[in-house]
Image: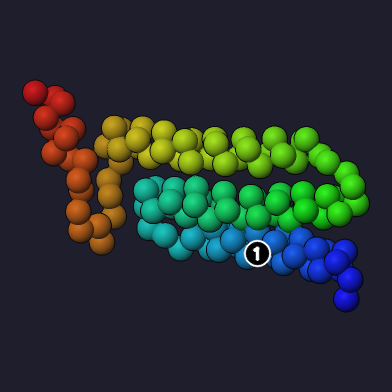
Amino acid sequence: MNVNNQIELVAVLLILLGTIFSFLSAVGLIRLPDVYTRSHAASKSATMGVLFTLVGTFVFFMIEDTFSIRLFLGIFFVFLTAPVASHVIVRSAYRSKVALTKESVQDDLKEIMEREKE
């Protein structure tokens, strides 16, 4: 097995890992009970799924001596914007008084929000 085959194997494994993370994200969006936990599934695992897929594609094209600035920028912007967007969505849901699920045991932000009102 030469070096190119080993790098191709790494690229394929990264893309497969990205696919698994994306699948788990979809399952989390279906199974989790409220907007807060669904947002966690969407932001963490979907971001990791897209990142692993893009990094695997980036590695694959690097062995063909092709540097893709689009893939590099895609990796950068997904890593930068997805967690921030998820945080903003959850914060706006909390400020809109979307109820937590009954299984939630702790609300750390409640005291802080009540102090801000005073």
Give coordinates of residue 39: x percent, y percent.
44, 48
Residue closest to the eye, 57 or 112: 57
Residue at x-position 21% and y-position 40%: 109
Q: Quadrant of the C terminus?
A: top left
Instruction: State whether residue 11 is above or below residue 70.
Output: below
The image quadrant that residue 115 belongs to is: top left
Residue at x-position 66% and y-position 42%: 75
Quick check: can you spot residue 102? no
Residue closest to the eye, 53 or 85: 53
The image quadrant that residue 63 belongs to is: bottom right
Quick check: can you spot residue 15? yes
Residue at x-position 55% and y-position 63%: 24
| Colouring of the image | rainbow
Q: Is residue 21 left or right of residue 67?
A: left
Residue closest to the eye, 68 or 96: 68
* Outermost residue toward the left in this view: 118
Q: Secondary structure at mark 1?
A: helix
Kind of residue at badge 1: Leu
Give coordinates of residue 11: x percent, y percent.
76, 61
Instruction: State whether residue 8 is above or below residue 79.
Output: below
Q: Is residue 12 left or right of residue 106?
A: right
Give coordinates of residue 36: x percent, y percent.
37, 48
Residue closest to the eye, 8 or 74: 8
* Outermost residue toward the bottom in this view: 1
Q: Quadrant of the N terminus?
A: bottom right
Q: Is residue 26 left or right of residue 37?
A: right
Q: Is residue 18 left or right of residue 9?
A: left
| Residue designated by label 1 | 17
* Outermost residue toward the top in this view: 118
Q: Residues within 10 Å of mark 1 (few under 14, many from 20)?
A: some
